[in-house]
Image (cartoon, rainbow, N blue to C red):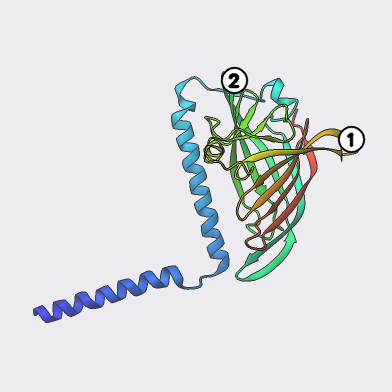
Amino acid sequence: MNINNIKYFIFCLGIITVVGVLFYFFYPRDNNLAQAEIVKVGEIKSNILKVQLNNQNYNDGTWLDVSRVSDEIYKYYPLSVGNKWEYGGQEKTIISSKTIQGSSDFTEVVKYIKQRDSTFVVSIDHCKGKQNVTFPGNCHEDLLYINGNKICDDIDCKETYLEFPLVVQTVMDSESYKNRVEMGIDDKMYVWYINNKVSLNIFGQKNSNCFEVEYFALPDEETDIFCYGVGFVQKYYNHNGTLDIIDEKLINFIEAN
């Protein structure tokens, strides 16, 4: 093979490689396959998180398996192994440039709880129902971190979700938000915020200790309602940038013990 043939072969191989890469990233694949890939990525990330957490925290002999969180937290948020919350509602979303409306229901079940001193790690299985508009029947693990009276998004409580007892018109602790305030931005965005206190009828009983828990960002917003002794009874999410709107309410709460 002479030098010209070799150059021609390398040129053709380069063209084939470029076409293959473009085909992979831009060819309109089946939407269900694309969704499956997204779900798979989420599962991989969740598994990586669990492995990292186990390696760094659970195998050093200082963490204990417990059936429930502390009594002080439980009276506000009943987190105990086997406790189940069932939600139902409506969802509007865009799939393949089409607006689809349908049901949105999911179940949350506490899988396990680990404790070290006043810190708890709570594993919750979050499973969508089979009739959901997006990712029907999909489950993933959510982890809650409890440090003292705080429910946090991370084990070091750099971002606080809830702090009991809840106080209206209060911004939750957040390192990122403190940085915004230091820059002169105090707009109560990109941080969890306890807005108003409301009274609701929950399973036939009046609960006067319910609170609006809000998170506003660009472009999405979330407004949940948390009630003492039950947990979250309503979850509302609006993306604004698209037509993604999810409106769900608690329809059943089952205590395992």
In this rendering, would 97 be left or right of 14? right
**Is residue 21 placed above or below 131 in the rendered structure?**
below
**Residue 109 x %, y %:** 68, 38
Q: Which amino acid lies under the numbered mark 1 shown in the image of this protein? A: Lys
**Is residue 169 placed above or below 114 in the rendered structure?**
below
Say what secondary structure mark 1 lies in.
strand
**Residue 100 x %, y %:** 70, 66
Is residue 1 at all visible to an observer of this figure?
A: no
**Residue 251 x %, y %:** 81, 45
Is residue 9 at all visible to an observer of this figure?
A: yes
Q: Which amino acid lies under the numbered mark 2 shown in the image of this protein? A: Ser
Per the model, the C-alpha gap separating discs 1 and 2 is 32 Å
Label disc, if present, on residue 105 of the rendered structure: none
Label disc, if present, on residue 206 of the rendered structure: 1
Q: Which residue is mark 2?
A: 118
Q: Quadrant of the C terminus?
A: top right
Q: Are marks 1 and 2 in contact (CB under 8 Å)?
A: no
**Residue 38 x %, y %:** 53, 57
